[in-house]
Image (spheres, rainbow, N blue to C red):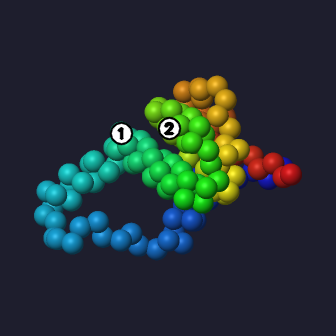
Amino acid sequence: MKSVQLDQLVERIDQAFGADMPFTDGGLSENDIATLNRVFADGGYQRYLQDQVNRQIIRDYLANAVVLNVISEEKVAACARRAGSVEGRSELSLHMLMNSVEQAEQLPLGADPEPLKPLGGGSGRPPHLNLIRS
């Protein structure tokens, strides 16, 4: 089984993207830049940003599924209920990223997901994923 250092993989992907697009058309003062750096580096902002991404994934996926007529009203309602919590949004968006819109009716919506917990590395190492080949 191959071991992958997730931080190294993410860094490699981020480097492939190149430079970030500017997020403002106007110039910024040094005070503005310092404030933005402080906000953007904050863990709370990172969680907020991930939640916004999850919301967008769910919104787009469900809208596409409805337009393509591949999801029932009952399933949309069940997804909407699940999307009411951070954990539910995280779970839904992951399933939606891993499945095509045409599979929307098969989204697993069993028991409520457990609260998310940060990954911990073993023996002083950073967290990693083991890839399982099917």
- Give the SS element for disc 2: helix
Q: Position of residue 67 (x, y in %)?
A: 54, 59
- Answer few, some or many: residues within 10 Å of disc 1's Cα (few below 14, many 20 plus, some between 14 and 19): few
Circles 2 and 1: CB atoms closer than 8 Å: no
**Between 58 and 21, which is closer to the camera in this rendering?**
58
Q: Identify the amino acid type marked 2.
A: Ala
Q: Viewed as shown, does residue 37 lie left or right of 63?
A: left
Q: Identify the amino acid type marked 1.
A: Gly
Residue at 51% x, 48% y: name it.
58
Residue, disc 2:
80
Based on the displayed image, in which of its 4 quarters is residue 68 positioned?
Answer: bottom right
Residue, disc 1:
44
Q: Viewed as shown, does residue 132 lie left or right of 81?
A: right
Q: Position of residue 10 (x, y in %)?
A: 57, 58
Q: Position of residue 85 (x, y in %)?
A: 47, 32
The Cα–Cα distance between marks 2 and 1, rounded to whole angstroms, is 24 Å
Quick check: can you spot residue 78? yes
